[in-house]
Amino acid sequence: MSGKHAENKQYPYETWDDEGTGRAAVQYPESKPSDPPKKRRVFWWIFLAIQVLFIVWLVTGINAAQTSPNEGLPAQEYQDAKDAGTAIGASLIVFVWAAVDFIVGGTYAIYRLVTRTK
């Protein structure tokens, strides 16, 4: 260490007194008590909104098949075709739902990696 003051600037840091006694004094920085910043949960609310939209889409898609009119097919064939169409439509909605969840989750994970503090 050169001179009267220590070169170490980490807190708390030592300084040599100016009176020449050779004793070190520990100084603590003045800190103001502050509340931690409020965490925003924007991603969480967006993710929940996406889930609600897909649930509404799935329920309305399944219920839409119940109200479709019969267009001249025999009753059993009509019911089988309606069930198959409902299953295909519901499967498609669930597939898109899972794909969107993976894309949103992956995007959020990349965002967290990029913005994390070092």
Image (tube, rainbow, N blue to C red):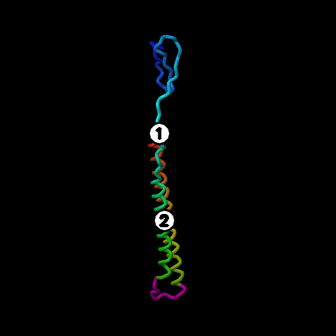
Real-space CA distance between mark 1 and mark 2, rounded to the nearest whole angstrom = 32 Å
Q: In x, y percent, where is residue 94?
A: 51, 66
Front residue of this view, candidates 65 and 36: 36
Assess whether mark 2 and mark 1 are in contact (beta carbons under 8 angstroms). Answer: no
Q: In x, y percent, where is residue 4?
A: 46, 14
Residue at x 45%, y 47% (from the top left corner) = 111
Q: How many marks?
A: 2
Main secondary-structure element of the magenta-colored stretch: loop
| Residue beneath disc 2 | 52
Q: In x, y percent, where is residue 40?
A: 46, 51
Front residue of this view, candidates 112 and 2: 2
- Packing grade of label 1 (10 A; few <14, some 14-19, many >=20) is few
Judge whether 19 appears above or below 111 on screen.
above
Q: In x, y percent, where is residue 106?
A: 48, 51
Q: In the rendered structure, which segment of residues is drawn in magenta? A: 68-76
Give the mark nearest the N terminus, 1 or 2: 2
Q: Which mark is residue 41?
A: none
Type of amino acid at the residue the image marks with label 2: Val
Q: Within the magenta stretch, is there residue 62?
A: no
- Packing grade of label 2 (10 A; few <14, some 14-19, many >=20) is few
Q: Within the magenta stretch, is there residue 73?
A: yes
Residue at x 51%, y 61% (from the top left corner) = 98
Front residue of this view, candidates 75 and 51: 51
| Residue beneath disc 1 | 117
Residue at x 50%, y 81% (from the top left corner) = 66
**Residue furthest out toward the top:** 20
Element on which disc 1 rests:
loop
Element on which disc 2 rests:
helix
Type of amino acid at the residue the image marks with label 1: Thr
